[in-house]
Amino acid sequence: MRQPDRSGNKPGRFSIPLRAAIALPVALILIASVGFQELTQHDNSTRLIDTTSIRLLDALTVTTNNRLANFLEVPFAAQQALGDAIVRYKLYTPGNMEPVYRHIVGTFHGLYQDQAQISVMSFGSALGEFAGVRRKDNHYNLMLSDRTTQGKLLIYKDNAPGATTATFAGYDPRTRPWYAPFAKSGKAGWSDIYANYDEFAEVTISAATPVRQDGQLLGVVDADVKLSDLNRFLRDETLRGSGSVAITDGQGVLIAHSGQSPVLSDGHGGIARGERLSLAQSEDPVLRAAAAWVSKTPQDQSVSFHDTVDGRAYSGRVTPFFDKRGLHWRIVTLVPDSDLVGDIRASTRQAAILLAMLAISGLLLCLWVIGWVTRPIHRTAQAANRLAQGDWLTKINTRSPIRETSTLVKAFNTMARQVDLAFNTMRDQLRLDGLTQLLTRQGLLEEVNWPEQRPAILCLIGLDGFRTINDNLGYDTSSRLLQAVAERLRNHLPCLALLARIGGDEFAVICVDPTQSADETGAQVLALFNAPFVSGDDEIMVSASVGVVEGMLSSDVLPEWLRNASVAMGEAKRRARMSSVVFEPAMLERLRELSRLTSDLRQALEHDQFLVHYQPVISMADGQISGVEALVRWQSPTRGLVPPAMFIPIAENSDLILALGDWVLRTATRDIAALLDRLSPQFELHVNVSARQLIQSDFINTLRQALQESGLPPQFLTLELTESVLIERGGQTVERLREIRGLGVKIAIDDFGTGYSSLSYLGTLPIDCLKIDKSFVDNICESSQDTAVVAAILHMARGFGVTAVAEGVETESQAQRLREMGCSHAQGYLFGRPVPFNEVNWPNP
C-alpha cells in the first residue's frame, strides 16, 4: 500500500519534459532573436538603399539640370550675338540680305561649328525678308526669302545661292512662332515648340531676340534646337546608367527623353499624328509610371518617389527646370534600384534564411552565428552612413565566409570604390593632361594656390608649324612629338618648375623663385629646341616661340599671366621663329588695335570702302606711259585714308587677302578694258598677287573669269609676284606660273634683288619682267655697290630676254643714270604718284 508524501506537496497535473522546457524558451529566444535581427538587417539595408539612391539621384538631377542649362545657353547667346552684329555692323539693308547671311555663315563656321545643338541661325526682317543657315548632318544650307527670290523661301544645297533643294511660296517669317511673340513683346526669350517650315518639318524650339536700331524694329533673330538633339543630349548622360531621363512641360507633355520610343504620336491610339505625347501616353512603361507623380506635384516643387515597373524597383525624382526667358519645364529621372545598390536586397534575404537554418543546430552556435553574420551588416550600415556624410574613402574590411554577407560587403565596397574612382578620375582629368601627364590649366591653377605671392617667371611655349606637322605626318606622330617635348621639358629644364600643357601645341613653364632674368630663362627654354625630337621612327626638328611674363605670382593673377604670355608669344611668332619675347603692357593695346583694325577691314570689304589707284609705268625712251600698276587704297570713314603698309599685312595673315585681291583684279581689269581703244597694244596693267592667292586651287579659274567678264585681252595683264614667294613655293610655283602664261597673261618678279634667289632657279621660271627694288634705286647716284647691283640686274634681264622696270624713281638724276645704264622702263614719284582712275593722264586716242 502506497504511503502519502510526508512533505505535503502533491504531484502537478500539468508537466513537460526537461528538454522541452529548455527547448521552448530557447526556441522563443531564438525566434525573437532571429526576428529582431531580420528587422535590424532590413532597416539597415533600406537606409543604405535610400541613402545611396538619394545621393545618386541628386548627382544625376543636378548634372542633368546644369548640362541642360549650358546646352541651351549656347544657342541663346549665339542668336543674341547675331542680333548685336546686325546692329553694330549695320548688316541689314532692306532688300539686301546678303551681308546678313554671309555673317551667319562665317559665324556658324568660325564660332559654332562644334556646337551641334544649334540647327538653324536666322534673321527675319520687319518687312518679311528672311535669311538663315541650316545645319543638318554637318552640312550647311542657306535659306533665303527676299526680293531676289520673289518672296519665295528658297533652301539651297550649300551655304551660298545656287542650286536649291526646296522652294516654299508665301513664306512670311513674321507669322512664325519664333518671330511674332518677340516682335510684339520686345524681349528675348524661348519660343513655343513648333515644326520647322522646311522639307523636314522637324519639331524645334527657338531662342529669339528682337533686333532694334534707333528705336525701330529691324526684325527678329533666332537659333533653333531640335527636340531630336535634346533626345541625344539626354542619352549621352553617363550617370543615368540603365535609367531614364525625360523633360516635360508644365502639363506633363513630353519634350525629350533618353529612350528610343518616339516623342510624337504616329496617329494611333486616338492621338493626332505629330502631336506630342504626354508621359501617360508614352510607349515607355517606366515613363508612364512617373506620369502620376508629375501630375500631382506642383510645378514649382520637387518630389522623390519609388515605384515598381514589370517587377523592377525604381527610384525617381521630379525636379522643376526654370529659365526666366520662357522655359517652365520639368526634369524626370528614374533609376532602377539594381543600378544603385546591386543585389543587396536579395543578399539580405538569403542571410536571414541562413541565420534561421543555423539556429536549429543549437542555442550557443545559433547565438554566435547570429552575431557573426550580423556584424558585417552593422558595419555596412555604419559605412553607408559615413559614405552619406562625404567620406569617399569608406571601406569595410570585415571578411566573412558566409556568401550572402560577403556579397553584401563586396557590393558595398565595389560601390564605394566606383564612387571614389569616379570622383578621382574626374579630378585627374581636370588636373592632368592624358597625353603628356603634365598639368592641365586647371591643375596649374591649383598648384599655384599658394598662401601668398611668390616671385616667378612664366614661359608660354608655342610650337611653330605644328598644324603642318599634324597634317603631313599624321595624328599619331604629332601626339608622340608632344610627348617627346613634354619629356624633354620635364628632364632638362634648368630650374625647378611647374609644367603644364594648356592647349593643343602650347606648354606652360613656371619657374618659382628664379635666379635668372626673364630674357635668360626664355633663351634657356628655347635652347631645348635646338636638337630634333624622336617621334617613333622619325626625328623631327621643330622650332618654338616663347612668351615670357615675370613678377609676383599667385593663383588669382595666373589667368592674367597666361593671357599676357599668350600675347607675348604671338609677338614672338610675328617676329621670327625661335624667338623669345618678354611681355610689355603696350603689347595689349597693340593687340586690341590689331583686332579692331581686322574687324574694320572685314567691314570695309562688305561696305565697298576700298579704292584702286594707278601709278604710271614710263618708257624711258620717250617718256610716254607704257603701263600702270594697280594699287589698293582704303578710304575708311573713321580712320581716313589708311596706308597700305598698315592693312595689307593684316589681310595677308587672314583670309581677307583672297577677297581683297580678287576685288582688285576684277576692278583693275574692268577699268583698263574700258580704255582699250586709247591704249597701244604694248600697254601693260600690273596687278600684285599674294602667295595666298597664288596657291588657291581655283586661282586660274578666278583669273580666267576676271578676264572674260572685263573683256581685257590677256596680253594686257601682268601679274606681279615677290621674289620670296617664287623661292618658297618651288616646283609648285613653276607649274602655276606656266598655267598663268598659258592664258596669255604676263608675269613680273616684284622687289627683285631682295630674295636671294639663284640664277639657275630664275632661269627655269616663265617670267616677262624684272622690277628692280626701290632700295637699289635710292642710292644709285651715290653708291657704287647699288649701281653694280642695278647693272647686274639689267644685264640679267637682257640675258633672259625680259623687260626691266626700275621702281621708286624720285629724282631726275636717278632717271638719267638709269637711262645711261640702259634701263627701258621706270616708275616712281618723279613720273607720277598713285592716283584714282579719273586723274591718270591716259594717252589720247
Image: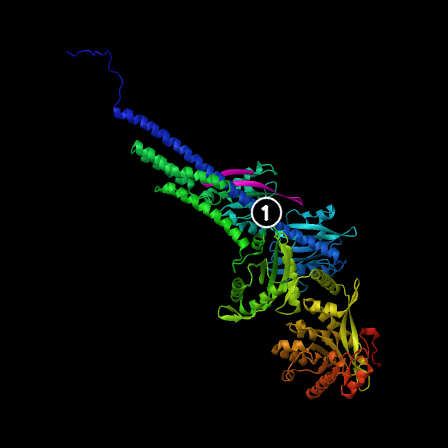
Pick the quarter of the image with the N terminus. top left
Identify residue for label 1: 66
Q: Nearer the viewer, residue 85 or 520?
A: 520
x, y (%) of residue 262?
55, 48
Asked where in the image residue 827 lies, by quadrant, the reply is: bottom right
- Find the residue positioned furthest to the front: 515
Magenta range is 303-327
Q: Looking at the image, is 408 positioned above or below residue 835?
A: above
- Examine the structure image and report whether residue 316 is included in the region drawn in magenta: yes
Residue 763 image offset from top left, x and y in percent: 65, 85
Residue 622: x percent and y percent?
82, 86
Q: Quadrant of residue 102?
A: bottom right
In the foreground, 747 or 21: 21
| 592 relative position to 447: left or right | right
Does residue 476 lie above or below 56 as drawn? below
Q: Quarter of the image holding residue 137? A: bottom right
At numbered mark 1, what does the secondary structure look like: helix, strand or loop?
Answer: helix
Name the side, left or right, on which 292 lies relative to 348.
Answer: right
Specify few, some or many for label 1: CA neighbours under 10 Å numbering under 14, 14-19, or 20 or more. few
Which residue is located at x 62 percent, y 69 percent? 577
Three-letter amino acid code of the residue under disc 1: Asn
Left or right for 280, reference 177: left
Which quadrant of the figure contains the C terminus? bottom right
Which secondary structure type mostly characterizes the magenta part of the structure?
strand
